[in-house]
Amino acid sequence: MDKTREIYDYLDNKLKDCTKELKQIEDRLNVIGDKSSSIVIKKINGKKYYYEQWRKDSEIHSKALGKVEPGAVYETEIEIQTRRDLSDRANELMFLIENLSREKDELYKHLLSNTFSDKFTFEVFWKNEISARVSVNKSKVHVSRYIIHPIRQIFSSDNISRNQLNEVLRLRCPEEGRADIQSKLKAWGLDEYNPIEIVKKTHGVSFNDYIWIRFPGENITAEDVLVR
């Protein structure tokens, strides 16, 4: 699991780096233009002239650069090559981002499937009234709901997937993206953001309601855990 998480974090950081670099390239291309052009020589009245030429909306456009002389279009050549290099890199980054995103999503699903133990139970309470009892057996999750109420019940059906259970528990946890999440995880003795492990520490309590979660072996009541 730790190795899988390391790979996931690497993909996540790589994806962020590629996305940041792509944004920088797009900003630069917005300044210097993203047209794909080339330099051609035209002969007019017996004299040779440089022109920058590009296609837009199925039409050929051109811009006069001056007489053909050594180094006369040096700066334009550099600009054209820079645009080509940036465009090539942007295409490469878009390909990388697409594949990194796909790999990250697949790995995330794998992490979720291994988030929980194969078999465990817990109970959900509204104050000291039992709201639901959850039984997990490998990929199957059964919810015995004792209250059907939009505020006092956190489950909408009796049978859900482990991914759905994970998302329900995630709503009872601090947001993963908050600035102080690492310090909170450290205070709870956790190495990674794992909803079930977080809820074991916090009992899933919130300032917004009176819901809390009890795990087997805990001799506690609402008065012991609720924050309001």
Image (cartoon, rainbow, N blue to C red):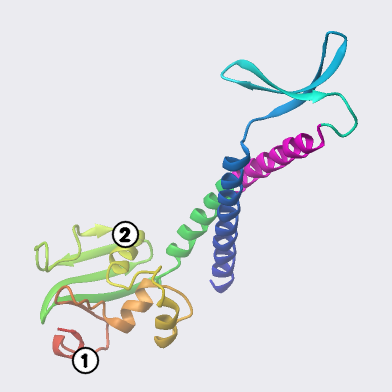
Query: Which label sits in the foreground, 1 or 2?
Result: 2
Q: Crowding at label 2, few (<14), some or many (≥20) Cα neighbours within 10 Å?
A: some
What residue is at 35 percent from the left and 74 percent from the top?
196
| Residue at image mark 1 | 219
> Where residue 79 appears, x then y in whole percent?
73, 38
Residue at 60% x, 53% y is 21
Badge 1 density bin: few <14, some 14–19, many ≥20, Cα 10 Å: few
Task: Please state the horizontal and vertical placement of residue 213, each as a whole percent of the image.
Answer: 23, 78
The magenta segment is 73-96
Indicate the position of residue 151 as horizontal and vertical percent values. Answer: 12, 66
Report the disc number at residue 5: none
**Which amino acid, by three-letter code, is at mark 2?**
Gln
Residue at (40% x, 78% y) in the render: 180
> What is the secondary structure assignment of the residue under circle 1?
loop
Q: CA distance from mark 1 to mark 2?
A: 28 Å
Q: Secondary structure at mark 2?
A: helix
Reply yes or no: does residue 78 show up in magenta: yes
Residue at 82% across / 19% down in the picture?
Answer: 49
Can you say whether 3 is above or below 200 in the image?
Answer: above
Who is closer to the viewer here, 222 or 38? 38
Picture quadrant where residue 188 is located? bottom left
* Label 2 sits on residue: 164
Q: Amino acid at mark 1?
A: Asn
Q: Quadrant of residue 203?
A: bottom left
